[in-house]
Every structure is written in structure tokens, then in C-alpha cells.
Image (spheres, rainbow, N blue to C red):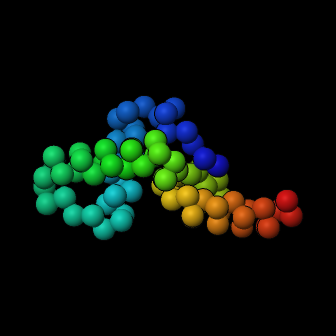
């Protein structure tokens, strides 16, 4: 399920983006300005519909996926459920 990023509180969205960037092996080197710029880039990608926030009920987890991953997830879901 796609979660509209606009419905997420700014502090929560910031935390989601930071967590995702960390899992993407991004190194901050303690530089807050660099981290904030990276988060802004993620939010811009969300606004441009290049990235999406996805909730996986089965895994009970939240993730950020790109449009290609989203299409794959949706096609797999449709295949699994015969839709």
C-alpha cells in the first residue's frame, strides 16, 4: 500500500527518509547539512513521483521504493492474488 508522503508529519517524514538513506549505505560523516540536503533530495523525489513510501502489511514495515520497484511489487501482488 502506498502512503501519501503529504499525510506524514514533517518530523516523521524526516526520520523515514534518514532511516532509508542510512539503509542505502549513505555516510553522513557527522555533517548535519549534508544529511539535510540528502533528505531534501529524497523528499523532492517523492514530490516528483520518482520515489514512493510503501507499507508492507505482511512484513509490517515501511520502505521507500522507486517507481520501478513499485511496479514490480504491484505486479507480484496482482499475480499472487489472481487479480
Decide if residue 41 is in sight here: yes
Across and down, in percent, residue 45 comes to 42, 49
Q: Nearer the viewer, residue 34 or 57?
A: 34
Decide if residue 60 is in sight here: no
Question: In the figure, 58 relative to 1: above or below?
Answer: below
Across and down, in percent, residue 36 comes to 23, 45
Q: Nearer the viewer, residue 71 or 32?
A: 71
Q: What residue lies at 51% left-to-right and 58% top-to-bottom?
A: 65
In this image, 41 relative to 64: left or right? left
Q: What residue lies at 38% left-to-right and 33% top-to-bottom?
A: 10
Quarter holding residue 4? top right
Q: What residue lies at 16% left-to-right and 47% top-to-bottom?
A: 32
Q: What residue lies at 57% left-to-right and 64% top-to-bottom?
A: 69
Q: Residue furthest left?
A: 30
Across and down, in percent, residue 56 comes to 61, 55
Quadrant in which the C terminus is drawn? bottom right
In this image, 39 relative to 55: left or right? left
Amino acid at each position: 500500500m502506498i502512503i501519501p508522503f503529504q499525510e506524514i508529519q514533517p518530523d516523521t517524514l524526516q526520520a523515514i527518509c534518514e532511516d532509508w538513506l542510512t539503509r542505502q549505505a549513505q555516510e553522513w560523516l557527522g555533517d548535519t547539512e549534508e544529511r539535510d540536503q540528502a533528505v531534501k533530495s529524497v523528499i523532492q523525489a517523492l514530490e516528483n513521483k520518482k520515489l514512493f513510501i510503501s507499507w508492507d502489511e505482511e512484513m509490517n514495515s515501511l520502505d521507500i521504493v522507486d517507481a520501478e520497484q513499485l511496479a514490480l511489487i504491484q505486479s507480484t501482488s496482482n499475480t499472487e492474488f489472481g487479480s
